[in-house]
Image (tube, grey):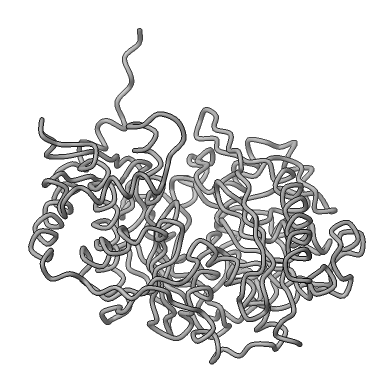
Amino acid sequence: MAADGLVLAVDLGSSVVKVGLVTLTGRVVAWTAEPLHTDRGSGGRVTQDAGEWWRTVGDSARRCLADSGADSGADGGHVVAVCVTGQWASTVPVGADGVPVGPCLMWSDTEGADRSRRVVAGHLQGYRATALATWVRRTAGVPSTSGADPVGHMLHLTHDEPDVAAAARWYLEPVDYLAMRFTGVAAATPASMTAAWLTDNRHPGHLAYDPVLVGRAGLDPDKLPPLVATGSVVAPLRPDVAADLGISPAAVVVTGVPDLHAAALGSGCVRDHEAHLSLGTTAWVSCPLPGKHTDLLRQMATVPGLRSDGYLLGNNQESAGRCLEWVARVLGDGPPAYDELTALAATSPPGAGDVLFTPWLAGERSPVDDRAARGGFHHVSLETSRADLVRAVLEGVAFNARWLLEAADHSAGQRLEPLRLVGGGTRSLLWCQVLADVCGRRMERVAEPLLTGLRGVALLSGLALGAVGWEDVRALVPVDVDLEPDPRHRTTYDTLFSEFTGLYRSQWRMFARLDRAVPASG
């Protein structure tokens, strides 16, 4: 397979879908981005229209092909593969033809909370001891009592939306749904089904659901898509889709992967303990690990990795880049201006005048699982400026990342350094340097960090088609900035970090009380 063959790469985020044409060796030729709409209702309902995703992907693909053909001479005949990454722990109910029969229940949809609690809830860190032991032994994780995962979604649909459940042939993750629209074939992988916690991950290459876990969850196994190997070819592109998009009918579709897996590839971190830090809407720290691992105290767990014999460290911080969007909306007029905000933050000194921001605007998952936690500004005075508030947001997200990173070190059994930085938040060199200074570690920003997911699935396609070897991946990912922590700021940030973690310890009871409080009427 020629290395200059093109991949139609799709990165389906929670708020934006990116579509690009990328070579099998990871060079981005053209790309587009389109916003996505989220519907929020009562009872924890959070949904998106998966049919709209498909229409947007098609329009974006045609635009990319037109742009790349004009600029570089590339055309649809050069496309040899299609691959999708993006959000996960969401559920799309589809008919036998792959067309949605209801909206996608998003990863933050908690309508199934009561159903999930009946399956796993108890008094041991919120879980029933037998359920915790059964799931963690087999998978390293456990379905959430919040209902915000596929088990909660599927239980909710089964018991609370019987019309949708009756019409659904398959319950698919978003990446697997789009792959089915491209191919007509229902398929999933141990990687794409990570958040369902229904595969025995002691043997990540075993392509079957665990009947004990499926039975304990009370799910219909016939609605779970067949499993194939991560990074394998699902099927050729449907001829009608190829004709509609103007792509070669010889193109194949490679299994989709969660954004975690695409980021590992797109950062070049594919060998054990090579770590990346993603700063997007949410944030995480991950690296490949050789063995299965769970740390319930710090909310860390390994998930099936990119290869059948390995794992990736999984964790997530609920709010990162979205904190900057929030403060822009609160402090400014009109849409957020990213460059202007970060330029304003640069006028505030390191430490932001000792103002601390806790970024738990939508609760937290790692290194503590507390959906009731909420954010706030602390130590604000009459002298505090807008610049101080914005810089405090950047630093607060960095303090949260340091908290997570120290937990990741514990799971990895070693200090993770250097870290490669990816995600839209790292477009700001200031924020990258703040991360390095707060965490006290060497970091490398990957070139075009916003496009890491597109690069990742292109490289996955290159691996699947034999155009790229695993030993080639790290060298194929360019780094544009090397960052060393500035020792002049160490004392300031160490002091503030100690106060940052102390704020959670002193406030978590308040979060719980307020979460249970009934709002006064009138």
Q: Is residue 112 above or below residue 367?
A: above
Across and down, in percent, residue 488 comes to: 10, 67
Q: Which residue does the image show at 67% across and 79% down from the upper left? A: 24
Q: Residue at horizontal 23%, vertical 45%?
A: 357
Assign the C terminus to one quadrant of the image: top left
Question: Where does the image place residue 228, in percent across and percent down from the top left?
Answer: 70, 74
Query: Looking at the image, which is closer to me, 355 or 427?
Result: 427
Task: Identify the residue at horizontal 32%, vertical 47% (top origin).
Answer: 370
In this rendering, the answer to whether 88 lies above or below 386 is below
Residue 286 falls left or right of residue 61: left
Q: Quadrant of the N terminus?
A: bottom right
**Could you tell whether 31 is left or right of 251 in the image?**
left
Residue 138 x %, y %: 48, 72
Q: In the figure, is residue 411 to the left or right of 101?
A: left
In the rendered image, the vertical position of residue 455 relative to residue 434, given as above or below: below
Between residue 381 and residue 180, name the one nearer to us.
381
Residue furthest to the top in view is 522
Residue 130, given in percent of the width and then of the height, sits at 41, 61
Query: Where, by quadrant of the figure, is residue 129 drawn?
Result: bottom left
Q: Is residue 505 left or right of residue 257?
A: left
Q: Nearer the viewer, residue 97 or 6?
A: 6
**Numbered marks: total:** 0
- Near-viewer residue (140 or 474): 474
